[in-house]
Image: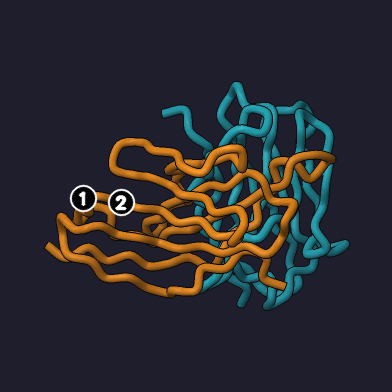
Chain colours: A orange, B cyan
Amino acid sequence: DQQVKQNSPSLSVQEGRISILNCDYTNSMFDYFLWYKKYPAEGPTFLISISSIKDKNEDGRFTVFLNKSAKHLSLHIVPSQPGDSAVYFCAASASGGTSYGKLTFGQGTILTVHP
Amino acid sequence: DTGVSQNPRHKITKRGQNVTFRCDPISEHNRLYWYRQTLGQGPEFLTYFQNEAQLEKSRLLSDRFSAERPKGSFSTLEIQRTEQGDSAMYLCASSLDVGPQHFGDGTRLSIL
């Protein structure tokens, strides 16, 4: 049962344009969401997070949008740079109980930014 | 650099052997997590500690797997009687309370 889904295995974007990565979730108990970036042979690197009390969080070139009614979140990168080429994972967790903090990840989206 | 450190980076072993991995978290972090990642998938939760207490274990963690965090600092993950299906990247992460988790670069396990 895939509770967090990234339906696009890959995305190709031109340098300077916007990259939009999407993520859907099914568990209505999820209330904290994160995006990670992963380069080959390295562990995931935390990028940005959002709590369910917000619908937008921005950090520099990265903005995460959360649509709770649709159980959907997206990561916008603008402008995209070749160094952004990596695998992007969305992750979610549910507050309360001993499971608080345990992350459920999507399958990842490979982003390629062309110069 | 005071990031999460994992050793070894690679481990190749024969089926049936025991293996042990070590994770050193960011020093001020009280939570430590273990995940497993296979090709084409996102990391899957295995277990986590708050200080030295192991608070949750996934169904993925069979009886052959055991994790410890004896003094609330570093952690070890042991796999006994390894099987082909144990081949994966084992990732460790740490966090301060329920803040963002910071990952190490993982230990890649290959079972011959």
Would you identify the image quadrant in which residue A3 lies?
A: bottom right
Q: Can residue B109 be seen in this view?
A: no
Residue in view at x 34 percent, y 44 percent: A62
Residue in view at x 26 percent, y 70 percent: A12
| Residue B47 higher or lower than A114, as above or below | above
Name the quarter where the C terminus of chain B is drawn.
bottom right
* Front residue of A29 and A90: A29
Tell me if mark 1 has few (under 14), some (14-19) or many (20+) residues whose alpha carbon lies within 10 angstroms of its own: some
| B93 left or right of B15 in image | left
Local SS, label 1: loop
Q: Is mark 1 in CB contact (under 8 Å) with mark 2? A: yes
Q: How far apart are marks 1 and 2 (CA)?
A: 6 Å
- The residue furthest right is B63
Mark 2 residue type? Ile
Mark 1 residue type? Pro
* Front residue of A80 and B109: A80
Q: Where is residue A58 in the image (x, y as percent from the top left)?
A: 39, 38
| Residue A11 higher or lower than B30, as above or below | below
Name the quarter where the N terminus of chain B is drawn.
top left
Instruction: Kindly identify which chain the residue marked by label 2 belongs to.
Output: A
* Front residue of B41 and A61: A61
Q: On the image, numbered disc 1 is attached to which residue?
A: A79
- The residue furthest left is A115
Q: Can residue A45 be seen in this view?
A: yes
Q: Where is residue A101 in the image (x, y as percent from the top left)?
A: 69, 41
Q: On the image, numbered disc 2 is attached to which residue?
A: A77
Would you identify the image quadrant in which residue A112 lies?
A: bottom left
* Front residue of B104 and A46: A46
